[in-house]
Image: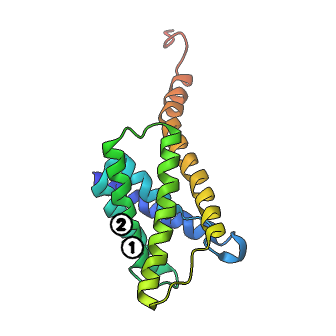
Amino acid sequence: MKAVSVLATVIVAVVLQMTLARFAVGGRWLFDLVLVGVVYAALLWGPVAGMLAGTIGGLLQDMLSAQVIGVGGLAKTVVGFAAGTVGAQFIVTQPGARVLVVAVASLAQRVLILALYALIDQRWSGVPWTAMLGETTLNVLCGWFVFQATEMLPGAIARGRLSRRPKWGPRKW
């Protein structure tokens, strides 16, 4: 059941990423919803789920982009495992802690990708800090929204069910 949930999370994240990337400036990846989905899976279901989500999500994202296949998958796998380990070792239930994990994961993933491309190309192109901070900010906002929405959803469903009940019980004629 956990594997199905992880797979569904990754598929939803990839579909949203592909859908919303068209509306971004010039079609560039200004945010990474797949990474947010990987961190979400890692914090909810642990390091193994984070690795699975990172591998599947990263490879799907690599295949759908014009990047080297495997670089994003490896980076997201490492970040997913690390986020899951942090979530298992510490209590990461507060919004501030979750936002911090998403921010660190976003920066770490981007640095890992830059380092892997530097190893492949045999040259270091530098770190685009402003682009990384912009992407991190958008990832943090998306992550905050996702975590808040999933926490509020069960309560909203329960309130909706209660509001449809008759207040005085069933009428008997």
Residue type, numbered disc 1: Gly
Residue 172 shown left or right of residue 59 in the figure: right
Is the residue 164 above or below the residue 151 in the image?
A: above
How far across and how far down the image is residue 4, in percent?
32, 56
Which residue is at the front of the view, 20 or 51? 51
Residue at the spot 38% in from the left edge and 80% down from the top edge: 70
Q: Quadrant of residue 72?
A: bottom left
Q: Residue at the spot x=51%, y=9% of the render?
A: 173
Q: Residue at x 29, y 52 (%)?
A: 2
Residue, x 51% and y 62% (percent of image)? 107
Up-down relation of residue 143 to residue 74 (above or below):
above
Residue 62: quarter of image: bottom left
Name which residue type carries label 2.
Answer: Thr
Q: Nearer the viewer, residue 97 or 51?
A: 97
Q: Which residue is mark 1?
A: 73
Residue 19 in picture, x, y percent from top left:
60, 68
Please, what secondary structure does the residue beneath circle 1 have? helix
In the rendering, which numbered label is found on residue 77?
Answer: 2
- Which secondary structure lies at badge 2? helix
Question: Mark 1: few, some, or many residues within 10 Å (few <14, many ≥20)?
Answer: many
Q: Can residue 61 be seen in the rendering of this structure? A: no
Give yes or no for contact between labels 1 and 2 (Cβ–Cβ under 8 Å).
Answer: yes
